[in-house]
Structures are given as structure tokens and as C-alpha cells.
Amino acid sequence: MRDATVELHGRTVAYTDIGDPAGTPVLYAHGAPMSRRNLGDQDEAFAAAGLRVITADRPGYGGSSPAPGRTLTGWVDDAAALADSLGVDRFLVAAHSSGGPYGVAVSALLPERVRGTVVLGGVTDFAWEPGWEGYSEVERAMMRLPDERAALEWGERHLGSSPTEWPEPDSRLFASRYVPHLAAAAKDAFAQGVGGYTQDSWVQGRPWAFDPAAAHSPFVVVHGDADTIVPIAHSRHTAGLVPGAELRVLPGHGHVTVLWELPDLLAELRDRS
């Protein structure tokens, strides 16, 4: 695994580069609160599938500089600049959980560069009012605040007071074995304090300022049937926004276990594009 930084738009962006260095490039958007180490134990699986997976910390997470006032669509410029800096022209896109909107945005706004997209357990556009139903009370509170400064102040007072109740498949996974890369990714998420996460949550609550229908490469939306973290209605809604998108509901999967399906899903997308 390569763990490095690059200067983009006057800011430091930290990223990992795993799998086959000569494989098909993939830009992956991590969940929240997570970081670039989110897929750290799948290096060999991605290499075996002929995939090179690049994961960047979003601003304020891990080793990436904060970017006050950033937007969802602004991240697309960072993704394009990161790909350019690594000599990558066209790529697949993958995204998980709170990274979902970033995956959709990159696919819609860089359609000439994206070969295919998979979104796993991703949140949808919160301009769709039913999206708020059944979603995390903590994140709803931050997303409904008037600005990111208010979200930061709220997070500094309240974050850490409510433990996550994981879906049963995820609880079984965590009970059966230690998953060090996820622990490292979660720790990295708060390396600079709670600012990255609170900003990420606040940005997540803003209406999408792009047209998802502009994504025209193969697009697969995946959701575990036992996921209680992100309601399945989110995936159904996102799939309905992208013409030709396929919704796959995976039996026996929670919110986190779906990540281990990613090598096969990406290999399939590559072979279709």
C-alpha cells in the first residue's frame, strides 16, 4: 500500500493507493467518519482483481487540509486534480455511505472520464424529504444547523455521547475478528479534531447542485438488506435519479460487510465498460 500526499489547489490531500499499480484505476469515496485507510485490508483482493484503488481523505479528515466553505461539487475538482497528478485519465468510481453523494457527483460531472460507478449503502440527496426518515439522529442534528460553524460547535459538545448500534451482520463481523484497518480509518478521521466530520455531515444535508442524470456510464447501487445505518430508501432514490442505474439488494449484508463485495463489483463494471 502506498500512503502519500499531494498538493492540490494550495491544499494538502492525503491518499492511499492499493491493489495492482498497473491495474484499472478506481477513485473511492470513503464514508463518515472514516478516512483513506477504509479499504486497507483489501490490498491483495484488489490486486488479484487487476484493480488499483485510490482513496483520498476529504478535507479535514486524516492528513488532508481543511477547506472551510467547501461544497459537494467542489470535491469533484479535487478528484480530477488527484487523478491528473497520478497520470490517470479514465477510471471507475466507488463510494460508500456518506461518500455516496461524492461518487454520484464525480460520475455526473466528469462523465467523459468515468468508466462506471458503484455506490454501496450510500446516502441520497436530502432535498428529497423522505431521505430524513430513519436516518441517524446525530447526523440529522448537524445537517439541519444553519452553517458549518454551528455544526462544528454542536459536534464539539455532543459527538461521542451516543454509540453506534450496528446491523446484525456488521456486529457479527466485529465480534468474530478484529478489523484493524477500520479502527485505523476511524481514528484518522479525527486526527485533526471533529471538524472534518461535522463539515462533511453539514455538506451532506445540502441539496445536490448537479444533475445525477448526467452520469451515463454503467451505474450500480448496492445495499445490504440488513443495513440499519442508511435506510434502503436512499439507494432506491439514488438509483431512480440515474438513468439506467441498477439497484442490487444483497441478502445477509449490513452497512459495512458490503465493502468486501467491492473487488468483484468493480471487476464486473470494468469488464462491462
Image: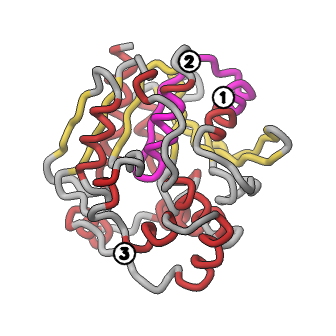
Tally the marks: 3
Of the 4 image quadrants, the one containing the N terminus is top right
Q: Amino acid at mark 1?
A: Ala
Tell me, for residue 80, which label it has, or none: 1
Write down the region rendered in magenta: 80-107
- Mark 2 burial class by Cα count in 10 Å: few <14, some 14-19, many 20+: some
Q: Amino acid at mark 2?
A: Arg
* Residue beneath disc 3: 164
Q: Earlier in the sequence, mark 2 or mark 3?
A: 2
In-image side of 90 versus 215 (left or right)? right
Disc 1 secondary structure class: helix
Q: Residue at x 69, y 59 (%)?
A: 60
Residue 134 rendering spot, x and y as whole percentages: 27, 64
In-image side of 118 versus 39 (left or right)? left
User: Label 1, label 3: how many angstroms apart (C-alpha)?
Assistant: 33 Å
In-image side of 15 versus 200 (left or right)? right
* Residue nearest the viewer, comparing 162 with 207: 207
Tell me, for residue 113, which label it has, or none: 2
Is 203 included in the stretch rendered in magenta?
no
Q: Earlier in the sequence, mark 2 or mark 1?
A: 1
